Amino acid sequence: MTTSFRLAPPLAAAIFLLAVGPLQADVMTYPAPRGEVLSAEYEILADGRKVDVYTARTLDTYLSGSQSDHGGPYSFASFDTSGPVTVRITSKRSLQKAIVRPVSPKVMVNLVDDHTMTIVLDGPRKLSIEPDSKRGPLLLFVNPPERNAPKPDTPGVVYFGPGVHEAGKIDVGAGQTVYLAGGAVVKGAISAIGSNIRIRGRGILDGSDYPWRHGPCHSIYIEGSNVAVEDIIIRGAPQWTIVPTNSDHVTIRNVKICNSRVPNDDGIDPCNSQDVLITDCFIRSDDDCVAMKGMAFSPSRNANVERITVENCILWCDRARVFLLGHESRAQHMRQITLRNLDVLHFTLPFALLEPGEDMRLEDVAIENVRLHGERQAELIRLRPTINEYMHKQTPGLIRNVVFKNIQLTGQPGRYLIDLAGADAAHDICGVSFQNISILGVPVTRDSRNVTVGPHVEKLSFPSN
């Protein structure tokens, strides 16, 4: 299985249309507000309806000195559909070699001419259309229909209608909802402290005007219980983006993060939190897509990082790791972590980095059903209890019971190292299993040339040759 989809001939598209049946879905679009500078690269029609195309920046000029090349500004667009839909994309650049990621048999792409393509979708889906890899792609977010949208005068709702809003810091508490309507661009950040809070809508929460690390708070800071963030787009976060801290029962669903404007723009960072579900999201970031941290320890509450699930997501990391587990690890435990059914479009450093410190136990981790597009990366997976400059207690942690299952990397030849090593006898690795891992179509075994195992690693399991 690959993670890209090249253009199909017209006959194949016609057969696909017959398979999905007549395209009569309800399509809802949201015009961009006046004053928003739209993309000059792309035009989109969804079943004949115009879809406005926004832009996002990468590596603001004052930060770009020695940073890696993220491909420059990119475009994104969003609309809703209740069923199958045909999307017509026109671009100023050639689409002859365009690739659509991730692959799906339910996505049919047809090249109309050098600058026009159609994409037939079976329903809601998130795609990256890449005429030239990272250089100027179009991110397309097709959502299910919105249900039960609040009215502007609904009690307990902080409502942002269509238009540009200079909001600054938005403080919300128990029982409140923040609603960003389609066509709203809200320049600011949200601090959600309390229980039963909702942040939702089809609008954009925009941090692009803030300098690096100078936003009023994280784009969305959460401290509470039973909090949901759903459906919105977040653009240009100036620091960590969504940060549940000392929280429990948090759901982040169908959120689209369009970052990579500054360093340290982690997508979602559950800190000292439990029962966090991250599902059906798209994350593009310069720094880690998802980083789990035990930032502080409190004897008065459960400060562990526990029962975190990331599923059905599409991930793109320009500089750091897709998943980082264990740095800033002052919690006693980080455990019961599930990462499943994921598409990694682009990455640089190891996509899964498990490096606990400060005597923290990182345990009961399952990483399964992951599809990656490889671009000659040196490393794929690293497990190493460690010490770094962010740790208060300068001792490593330890790793227990980790399963990697059904992971396929396709793309270009590369080293793709899988590296395991304990720090010492007290900070070791025990109980790691690799099941059905393949790199460029070749099954990975204990004797594979890209597997390195250092000292203090016990009960390591690979399939036999």
Image (spheres, rainbow, N blue to C red):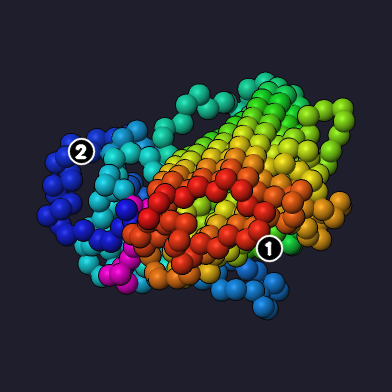
**Residue 26 within the segment the image draws in magenta:** no
Name the residue that disc number 1 marks: 263
Q: Residue at x 42, y 68 (%)?
A: 133
Q: Residue at x 78, y 38 (%)?
A: 332
Q: CA distance from mark 2 to mark 1?
A: 43 Å
Q: Position of residue 434 (x, y in %)?
A: 48, 48
Q: Main secondary structure of the magenta part?
A: loop
Q: Which residue occupies the foreground of this view, 120 or 432? A: 432
Q: Position of residue 348 (x, y in %)?
A: 55, 65
Classify residue 123 as left or right of residue 373. Answer: left
Classify residue 127 as left or right of residue 294. Answer: left
Classify residue 281 as left or right of residue 43. Answer: right
Q: Which residues are magenta?
A: 94-103
Residue 86's disc number: none
- Type of amino acid at the residue the image marks with label 2: Val
**Element marked by disc 2:** helix
Q: Which residue occupies the foreground of this view, 299 or 448? A: 448
Q: Residue at x 85, y 55 (%)?
A: 394
Q: Residue at x 39, y 69 (%)?
A: 412
